Amino acid sequence: MSLERINPDSLGRPSGFSHAVRATDTVRVYLAGQTALDKSGAIVGTGVVEQFEQALSNLLTALAAAGGAPEHLATVTVFIVDVADYRAHAREIGAVWRRLAGTEYPAMAGIGIARLWDDDALVEVQAVAEIPRGADQRSRG
């Protein structure tokens, strides 16, 4: 299994993402958008950094249940209610990403939106992962 991060010299140097990711010999897993919901269904955290951490943790929990790990993330989309606030906290959010998911970045997009399903949600994280064939069965097995 291989996830190759592709960052052509003809494009700007990526910071916190890869321009493209190519997968070979994998099983694709689609991960539903995750907000800062806790197990009881309540949004936790009042700020974007806290909510991003909970949302990413939720996404990684679903990924692990499917047999994957952070390094298997091929693409991640972050839906953001307040883009200016998210950008103002980009360093802290980056630190959360590195602590929870490491330093290998998937192809990523951040999209500003008017609101999310839950009124108190500030951010939602959605992804597609490419898990090595067989690893998905071993972890659930």
Image (cartoon, rainbow, N blue to C red):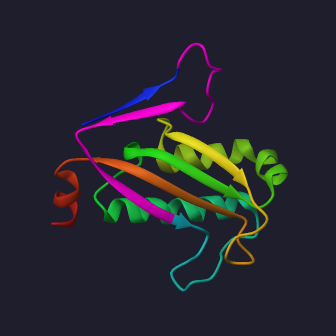
Work out which quarter of the rendered image holds the C terminus and state it: bottom left
Number of marks: 0
- In percent of the image, x 60 and y 14: which residue is there? 10
Q: Nearer the viewer, residue 52 or 76?
A: 76
- Of 93 and 19, nearer the camera is 19
Instruction: Give the residue at x 26% y 44%.
Output: 26
Spot the residue most to the top: 9
Percent across and percent down for residue 1 are: 24, 37
Residue farthest to the bottom?
40
Q: In the image, is residue 16 part of the stretch drawn in magenta? A: yes
Q: Residue at x 49, y 45 (%)?
A: 75
135 shown above or below 10: below
In the image, is residue 44 above or below residue 78? below
* Of 17 and 92, the residue lying toward us: 17
Residue span colored magenta? 8-32
Whole-percent x and y of residue 90? 73, 44
| Above or below: residue 10 compared with residue 138 | above
Identify the residue at image location x=16%, y=51%: 134
